[in-house]
Amino acid sequence: MVLVVAGGLCLAKQPESHYQRKWCEAQHGRTEVRLPDRTRVDCILDTHAVEVDFARKWAEAIGQSLHYSRMTGKRAGILLIMLSPKDQKHLDRLLNVVQHFNLPIDVFTIE
């Protein structure tokens, strides 16, 4: 299942951590959770381990989210930060790969 949730309109680019913190807090999650292998999950929810990245880094987010899922036993999630309408192509690529390979990743967006 691929779930896409849109956020509010972004007027200025902020660091990744700004969007990570804002979204994760709204979902009642925990940010920057260190795993036994010393990697850090951007946001841990009750059900998901979520990788947060700017849209252009969609391909990297796939591997990281699957790794965090394996390490935590939670479902993989990716939160793509969408800064402009041009980022839609990155979201489309991500969704196509997830669907084509039937990857167990839920996709969220914030604008």
Image (cartoon, grey):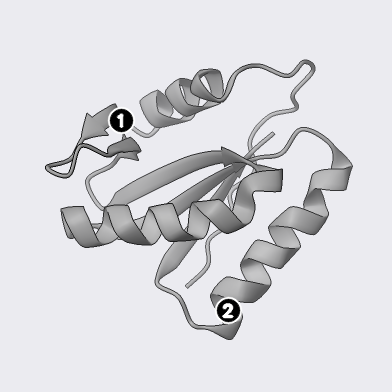
Q: Residue furthest front?
A: 37
Question: For the image shown, how many numbered marks are present on the structure?
Answer: 2
Q: Residue at x 53, y 18 (%)?
A: 18
Distance between the Cα atoms at labels 2 and 1? Answer: 28 Å
Residue 72: mark in rendering: none
Q: Please, what is the three-letter code of the amino acid marked with disc 2?
A: Gln
Crowding around mark 2 (Cα neighbors within 10 Å: few <14, some 14 to 19, many 20+) is some
Crowding around mark 1 (Cα neighbors within 10 Å: few <14, some 14 to 19, many 20+) is few
Q: Residue at x 39, y 46 (%)?
A: 50
Q: Residue furthest right?
A: 86
Circle 2 sits in a helix, a strand or a loop, which is it? Answer: helix
Residue 84 % position (x, y): 83, 36
Q: Quadrant of residue 12?
A: top right
Residue 33 % position (x, y): 23, 32
- Looking at the image, is 31 positioned above or below residue 45? above
Residue 82 % position (x, y): 71, 39
Residue 28: mark in rendering: 1
Drawn side of residue 84 relative to residue 70, left or right: right
Residue 99: mark in rendering: 2
Circle 1 sits in a helix, a strand or a loop, which is it? Answer: loop
Q: Please, what is the three-letter code of the amino acid marked with disc 1?
A: His
Q: Quadrant of residue 9?
A: top right
Q: What quarter of the picture does the C terminus occupy?
A: top right
Q: Nearer the viewer, residue 82 or 34?
A: 34
Q: Residue at x 45, y 75 (%)?
A: 103
Q: Residue at x 71, y 46 (%)?
A: 56
Q: Residue furthest left?
A: 36
